[in-house]
């Protein structure tokens, strides 16, 4: 009952799930995060990307009040993460990048302990369904953690993060260590919580995963936000590879629009990289003996890797 | 509050085996000392043994030496024996550096991302320190009581319960003192090994300082820096009262350590 009331309160006041304002965090002379501004709306799945050391984990730890910001503020559902940390964190489920666990404890002991620290009680039926979905049966939970594989620990981490069905899930590299089957289960789980209006803020290095599950992407580079956009918009920034097969020999094109980049030209096949809409290409091909047209879907990776490379340079 | 109690219970669960084993060993040690005291008392060889003790040891122990070489002295040794003191201080340091250990492992992340205030982590450690201490003292006194009742009936004058309680109070305050120091250091550290080593080394150095100062006058000027100077079981053995000032100093160091731990832990990055 208390649990439902709490959810209503969060939902009744429409506000960002996460709001980061002019956040800076320095460690001595090193600036890990610089003047970061970011809003994550309720119900969104946002991917938080960046190379190692870009400041992703630092930002997440400030949100969870594990780190104190040098300047700026962070809010979760309108609550200041530092001044109203307890209220803010009562809506959060967190999966750390690395689970620090005492090996002599059983999986069940860890789940019960962490559930007890939450303000809301854990729905046992929901937890059982999580166990089923992630294939971590009661028998495994009775075992000590020293007997757990990396994947099992990850599953346990996911269950502890999701078990109280929090309004906001902050996940650090959630599929790290999971096999492909379990990754699928995790994506289904994510789709399920998203359908129910939960917000997910996840860091990941797996770009295909981000492309698949996220609505928006925030990309950090050396502590600064360099890209914040929807997955669709980013995909539109990417050039598509197009291969045109002709039924008879065709002369090489004399000139092509600026958005066209030639990859390979042969008498019966052209390979091009095209930015923007394909209408111009269709016009150019009018009258030519086109046998087949193969368009490769634009990949998020192509854009993001460009951002990563610029950062590395 | 519910979360804090769960945190406390969970921490006890992790330490219970160690504390139980230690309590049993300490209780057995008390019985063992009573066995030795009974054996010496029966053979009436306390005087002969005194003669075997080297003069410098007598000098170090001062006038308490005579009191120590008695049935009552041997029985009470279990409350200030170096091994007992050392193991209890080590346990106090282990408990007080739990926050550092949890940070080092990453377990603290899982705890503090829940709606748990940071001060509960320190309160938990203090509560554990006090409860474990009380349990171990109860086990030690039970060992003494069992030993005296089963092994030392009518052989010699038993140490009075209030005398044992004063020894326990003195030892308890020494543990609170070192627990406080370890907690303050641990609340700032990222590594338990580092916090434990610093506190352990500090304890060793100050223990040696106190001992050296008893035999070497130049060291006396700085002996007040050692918490062990305020730990006076031999005074009790000689039938004197412990200066209340000494008890307050030990309690004060412990309390200051606890307060500093709260401050350090509330301000630090995890």
Image (cartoon, coloured by chain):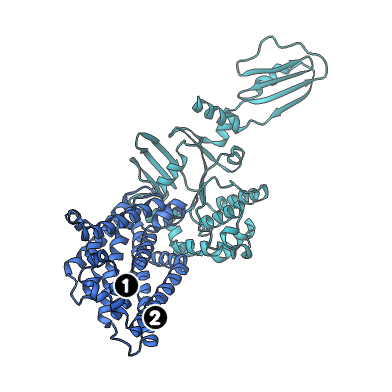
Chain colours: A cyan, B blue
Label 2 belongs to which residue? Answer: B35
Q: Residue at x 32, y 80 (%)?
A: B45
Label 1 belongs to which residue? Answer: B79
Q: Is residue B175 left or right of residue A64?
A: left
**x, y percentage for residue A164?**
50, 60
Question: Of B222 and B68, which appears nearest the observer?
Answer: B68
Q: Residue at x 16, y 66 (%)?
A: B245
Q: Secondary structure at mark 1?
A: helix
**x, y percentage for residue A286?**
74, 17
Cβ–Cβ below 8 Å for labels 1 and 2? no
User: Farthest residue toward the top?
Assistant: A254
Instruction: Tell me: residue A129, above or below residue A231.
Output: below
Q: Residues within 10 Å of mark 2 (few under 14, many from 20)?
A: some
Q: Is residue A15 visible?
A: no
**x, y percentage for residue B188?**
34, 50
**Mark 1 and mark 2: Cα distance apart in space:** 16 Å
Instruction: Tell me: residue A6, above or below residue A293.
Output: below
Question: Of B228 and A79, which appears nearest the observer?
Answer: B228
């Amino acid at each position: 009952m208390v649990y439902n009331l709490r959810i209503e309160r969060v939902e009744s006041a429409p506000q960002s799930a996460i709001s980061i304002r002019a956040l800076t965090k320095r460690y001595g002379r090193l600036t890990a995060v610089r003047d970061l501004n970011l809003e994550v709306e309720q119900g969104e799945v946002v991917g938080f990307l960046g190379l190692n050391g870009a400041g992703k984990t630092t930002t997440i730890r400030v949100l969870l009040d594990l780190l104190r910001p040098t300047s700026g503020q962070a809010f979760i559902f309108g609550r200041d993460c530092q001044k109203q940390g307890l209220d803010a964190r009562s809506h959060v489920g967190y999966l750390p990048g690395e689970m620090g666990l005492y090996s002599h404890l059983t999986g069940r002991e860890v789940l019960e302990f962490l559930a007890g620290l939450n303000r809301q009680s854990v729905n046992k039926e929901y937890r059982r369904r999580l166990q089923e979905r992630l294939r971590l049966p009661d028998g495994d939970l009775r075992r000590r953690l020293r007997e757990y594989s990396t994947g099992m620990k990850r599953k346990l981490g996911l269950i502890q993060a999701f078990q109280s069905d929090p309004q906001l899930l902050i996940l650090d590299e959630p599929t790290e260590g999971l096999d492909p089957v379990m990754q699928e289960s995790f994506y289904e789980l994510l789709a399920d919580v998203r359908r129910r209006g939960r917000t997910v803020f996840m860091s990941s290095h797996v770009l295909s995963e981000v492309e698949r599950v996220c609505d928006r992407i925030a990309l950090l580079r050396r502590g600064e936000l360099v890209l914040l956009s929807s997955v669709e918009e980013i995909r539109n920034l990417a050039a598509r590879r197009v291969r045109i097969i002709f039924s008879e020999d065709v002369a090489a094109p004399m000139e092509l629009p600026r958005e066209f980049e030639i990859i390979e030209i042969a008498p019966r096949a052209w390979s091009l990289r095209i930015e923007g809409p394909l209408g111009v290409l269709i016009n150019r091909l009018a009258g030519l003996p086109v046998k087949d047209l193969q368009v490769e879907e634009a990949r998020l990776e192509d854009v993001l890797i460009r951002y990563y490379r610029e950062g590395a340079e | 509050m519910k979360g804090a109690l769960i945190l406390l219970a969970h921490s006890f669960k992790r330490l219970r085996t160690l504390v139980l084993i230690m309590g049993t060993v300490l209780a057995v040690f008390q019985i063992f000392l009573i066995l030795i005291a009974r054996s010496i008392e029966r053979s009436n060889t306390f005087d002969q043994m005194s003669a075997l003790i080297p003069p410098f040891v007598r000098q170090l122990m001062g006038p308490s030496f005579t009191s120590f070489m008695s049935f009552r002295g041997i029985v009470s040794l279990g409350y200030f024996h170096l091994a007992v003191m050392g193991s209890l201080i080590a346990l106090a340091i282990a408990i007080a550096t739990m926050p550092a250990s949890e940070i080092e492992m990453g377990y603290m992340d899982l705890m503090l991302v829940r709606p748990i205030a940071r001060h509960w982590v320190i309160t938990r450690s203090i509560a554990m320190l006090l409860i474990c201490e009380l349990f171990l003292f109860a086990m030690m006194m039970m060992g003494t009581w069992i030993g005296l009742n089963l092994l030392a009936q009518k052989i010699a004058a038993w140490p009075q319960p209030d005398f044992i309680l004063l020894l326990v109070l003195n030892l308890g305050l020494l543990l609170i003192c070192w627990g406080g120091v370890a907690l303050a250091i641990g609340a700032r550290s990222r590594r338990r090994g580092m916090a434990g080593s610093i506190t352990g080394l500090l304890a060793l150095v100050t223990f040696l300082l106190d001992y050296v100062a008893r035999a070497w006058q130049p060291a006396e000027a700085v002996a007040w820096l050692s918490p062990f100077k305020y730990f006076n079981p031999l005074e009790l053995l000689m039938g004197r009262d412990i200066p209340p000032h000494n008890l307050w100093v030990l309690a004060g160091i412990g309390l200051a350590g606890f307060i500093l731990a709260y401050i350090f832990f509330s301000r630090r990055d995890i």
